[in-house]
Image (tube, grey):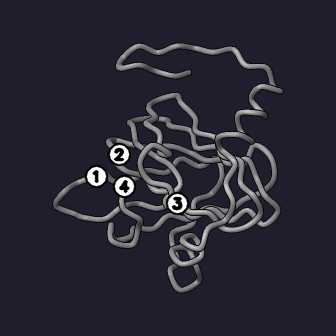
Amino acid sequence: MTHFDHTFLPFDLSPADFERFLEASRHLAPSPLAARLCGAEAPGERIVAGQPFALPDEDSRRPGVWLLCVDAPRGADFVLHVASGRLVFGPADRPGRAHEYAEVGQELWFRLEPGRHVFAARGQQDFTGAWRAAQGAASVSRRQAAESDLPGVP
C-alpha cells in the first residue's frame, strides 16, 4: 500500500517480491547510535511482543523524541503494527526520507541484521500499536531521548 496525498494504492506482491523489497529497502545493520542510545546505561521500559503499547502525543511543550530500542541477537524481521492513531517512524540514524508515515491498520517492516537497532517515532497522535518478529527473535524497549541526541534531518 502506498499513498499520494490522500489517495491509497494497494499492491499485490508475491512473497519473492516482498523478500526483495525487504533486502533492498528495509535491510538494516546495527548502528553505533543504537549502541549509544540503547545501551545498559540508558535503560528503557520493556515492551512485550504482541502486547499493545502507546506513545504519548508529540507535544512542543515536552521536547524530545520517543525511541524503540530493538535487540535482535540473531537477526529478525521486525514489524510495527499501528492499531490506532498515526506516527512517523524509522531508523533513528537515518532521519528524513527513511522515515514513513503510518496510520491505523498499516504495518512497517524492517529486516534487521544481528545486533542492536534504534528507531525514532515522531508526530505521533493517539498512537497505539504492537510489534512482532515475523522471523527470528527480538526484544524491544522504549525510552525518550533529547532531540540533540539524534542526527539532524538533512
The nearer-to-camera label among 4 and 2 is 4
Select label 1 or label 4 by which is in front.
4
Residue linked to disc 2: 124
In terms of image quadrants, where is residue 16? Answer: top right
Secondary structure under badge 2? strand
Q: Is residue 115 left or right of residue 131?
A: right
Q: Looking at the image, is 82 positioned above or below residue 16?
A: below
Say which amino acid is labelled 1.
Glu
Three-letter amino acid code at the position of disc 4: Val
- Percent x, y of residue 64: 31, 65
Relative depth, front residue between 139 and 151: 151
Q: Which residue is mark 4?
A: 153
Quarter of the rendering occupied by the N terminus: top right
- Whether pointer 2 and pointer 1 mark residues with C-beta atoms closer than 8 Å, the reply is yes
Mark 2 / mark 3, whichever is N-terminal: 3
Q: Which mark is residue 68?
A: 3
Q: Residue at x 45, y 20 (%)?
A: 3
Residue 55 or residue 1, whichever sits in front: 1
Of callouts 4 and 3, the N-terminal one: 3
Q: Could you tell me how far apart the alpha carbons at marks 4 and 3 are, in whole angstroms? A: 18 Å
N-terminal of the pair, mark 1 or mark 4, is 1
Which numbered disc flags the more N-terminal residue, 1 or 3? 1
User: Label 4, label 2: how many angstroms apart (C-alpha)?
Assistant: 17 Å
* Disc 2 residue type (three-letter): Gln
| Residue underneath mark 1 | 58
Please determine whether, in this image, residue 66 is positioned above or below residue 26.
Answer: below
